[in-house]
Image (cartoon, grey):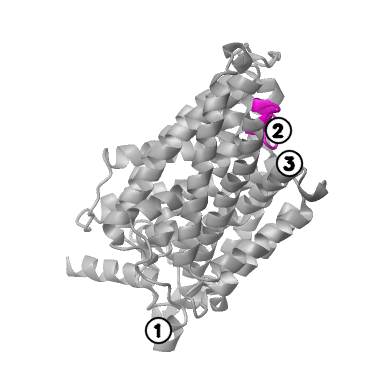
């Protein structure tokens, strides 16, 4: 049975986005079912921290080479405000629309199939590339430890991809619990680092990069005002991927309450850890010394027992994010595939209710990208996808508030559209900032995004699955609007 999608005609513009969907039989969804009720809000908060905590251990410090301590500090404050506003907006949308699609689900309801797929595609770019960047940082930590005489990280990348995809295939409950334990270890590592680094802190180290001749350059802003903007993608690395918490909605207990609690609690933890790391690493090791390091916490401490401990535990932090973002990309790909936006075979789940190909295919792509060894470049590419998805998700919140004011929202964003409007503006500037840092890498990501949209325009918009959860959310909204 074919039906014209109710969202195909946009009421405000009068454009006609012809999409067609059909109802699949019971066996279709039975083969595409996730395990229910595996996570409460504490486990979800742990998942949120797990997504991000590698950003405390490596990657953010490359922003010192773009903006110096002052530029990165200002960028981090702005970006922290953006993420807090965005998280509050996502908490509301996840309480109203608890489904495995996360940001794609929100955008699908607010902006129709084109907006939903655009958001999902941007998120996939972020989540497919971020683990590749993290893999290069894992390689740097392993090499600094001298484990097994490793001097070339490519097979380390292969091992971590293979092992952690295998664990995920064993089921979500097991994977989430393992992530929670690893994240706890990583947080202990940050405490050990902080205690050791306080004794080595010297305020003069914060500004030891020599000023350039750029406009506004000083000891505090050695690369001038433009350095603040160039540091934005690296400030995002302190928080990137926390927006993945709503992807666990279909596997959470009482998701309308626990998903908002989990994502807000995770954001609170990450605000603290990000501030501690930014000040103590730079103050103990010196901005100039750690600005291009693959393991900045270790280099900041120098030689000694604490340095060795942090180096080993740092691996746990990197592994936690690597492991958890795999969970995120598999759920986003699962949701898009189940609804017919991407090839439907990608959403088939195994006997443990884990989406097999949705875990393996992005893993292969990520491994191939990690072979470049360019962690900074991959980081910037992941940020492009993330920032673009943030723009679309914040637009979704504003549209839903305007078009569906009576939608049941167990949690409501403080400040409403003003809060998410602020996040929208900063996210748009962040997209532009990725071109400032590495225009070639950002253009490649833009090309991939355009290819996704072309696939949707040419093929998949004619093959959507009407009885998938996200499409049913949209159909329900249309039916309610007609009744009103």
Q: Quadrant of the N terminus?
A: bottom left
Residue 255 spot, x, y in % from top left: 31, 60
Q: Residue under circle 2? A: 293
Question: Percent position (x, y) of residue 481?
Answer: 23, 65
x and y, in percent, of residue 154 in the image: 78, 54
Cα gap from disc 2 to disc 3, whole angstroms: 14 Å
Residue 455 vertical position relative to residue 429 in the rendered view, above or below: below
Tell me which residue sits at (64%, 68%) in the image: 361
Please report contact status of discs 3 and 1: CB closer than 8 Å, yes or no.
no
State the separation of the CA atoms marked 1 and 2.
Answer: 53 Å
Sequence-wise first label, 1 or 2 = 1
Residue 296 included in the magenta stretch of the image: yes
Question: Image quarter for residue 484?
Answer: bottom left
Between circles 3 and 1, the one closer to the viewer is 3
Tag in front: 2 or 3: 3
User: Can the viewer see residue 137?
Assistant: yes
Image: 461 above or below 101: below
Question: 478 or 276: which is nearer to us?
Answer: 276
Secondary structure under tag 3 reads helix
Residues packed near mark 1 inside 10 Å, few (<14), some (14 to 19) or many (20 plus): some
Q: Which residue is mark 3?
A: 145
Residue at 60% of width from left, 18% of height from top? Answer: 200
Q: Which stretch appears magenta?
A: 290-304
**In the picture, residue 436 is in which quadrant?**
top right
* The label number, if any, that marks residue 225 in the structure image: none
First reached walking from the N terminus: tag 2 or tag 3: 3
Image spot of residue 381 (x, y percent): 64, 47
Q: Which residue is mark 1?
A: 23
In-image side of 112 versus 389 (left or right): left
């Amino acid at each position: 049975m074919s039906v014209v999608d109710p969202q195909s005609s946009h009421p405000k513009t009068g454009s006609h986005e012809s999409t067609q969907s059909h109802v699949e039989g019971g066996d279709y969804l039975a083969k595409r079912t996730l395990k229910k009720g595996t996570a409460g809000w504490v486990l979800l908060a742990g998942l949120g921290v797990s997504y991000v905590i590698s950003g405390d251990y490596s990657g953010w410090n490359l922003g010192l080479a773009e903006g110096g301590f002052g530029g990165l500090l200002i960028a981090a404050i702005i970006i922290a405000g953006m993420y807090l506003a965005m998280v509050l907006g996502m908490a509301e949308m996840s309480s109203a629309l608890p489904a495995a699609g996360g940001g794609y689900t929100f955008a699908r309801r607010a902006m129709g199939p084109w907006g939903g797929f655009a958001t999902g595609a941007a998120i996939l770019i972020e989540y497919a590339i971020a683990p590749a960047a993290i893999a290069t940082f894992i390689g740097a930590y392993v090499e600094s430890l001298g484990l097994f005489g490793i001097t070339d990280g490519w097979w380390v990348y292969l091992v971590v991809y293979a092992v952690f995809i295998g664990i995920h295939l064993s089921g979500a409950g097991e994977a989430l619990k393992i992530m929670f334990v690893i994240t706890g270890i990583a947080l202990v590592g940050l405490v050990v680092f902080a205690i050791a680094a306080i004794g080595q802190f010297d305020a003069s180290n914060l500004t030891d990069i020599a000023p350039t001749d750029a406009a506004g350059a000083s000891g505090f802003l050695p690369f001038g005002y433009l350095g603040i903007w160039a540091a934005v993608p690296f400030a995002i690395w302190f928080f990137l991927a926390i927006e993945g918490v709503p992807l666990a909605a279909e596997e959470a207990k009482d998701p309308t309450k626990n998903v908002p609690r989990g994502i807000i609690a995770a954001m609170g933890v990450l605000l603290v850890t990000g501030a501690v790391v930014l000040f103590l690493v730079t103050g103990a090791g010196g901005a100039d010394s750690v600005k291009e390091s693959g393991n900045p916490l270790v280099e900041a401490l120098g030689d000694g027992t604490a340095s060795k401990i942090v180096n080993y535990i740092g691996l746990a932090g990197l592994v936690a994010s690597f492991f958890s973002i795999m969970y995120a990309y598999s759920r986003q790909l699962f949701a898009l595939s189940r609804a017919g936006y991407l090839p439907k075979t990608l959403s088939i789940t195994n006997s443990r209710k884990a989406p097999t190909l949705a875990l393996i295919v992005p893993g292969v792509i990520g491994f191939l990208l990690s072979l470049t060894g360019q962690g900074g470049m991959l980081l910037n590419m992941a940020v492009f996808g993330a920032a673009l998805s943030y723009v679309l998700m914040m637009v979704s919140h504003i549209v839903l508030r305007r078009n569906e004011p009576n939608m049941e929202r167990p949690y409501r964003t403080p400040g409403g559209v003003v809060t998410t409007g602020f996040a929208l503006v900063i996210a748009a500037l962040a997209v532009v900032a990725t071109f400032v840092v590495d225009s070639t890498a950002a253009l490649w990501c833009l090309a991939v995004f355009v290819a996704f949209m072309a696939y949707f325009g040419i093929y998949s918009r004619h093959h959507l699955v009407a009885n998938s959860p996200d499409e049913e959310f949209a159909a329900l909204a249309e039916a309610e609007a007609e009744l009103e």
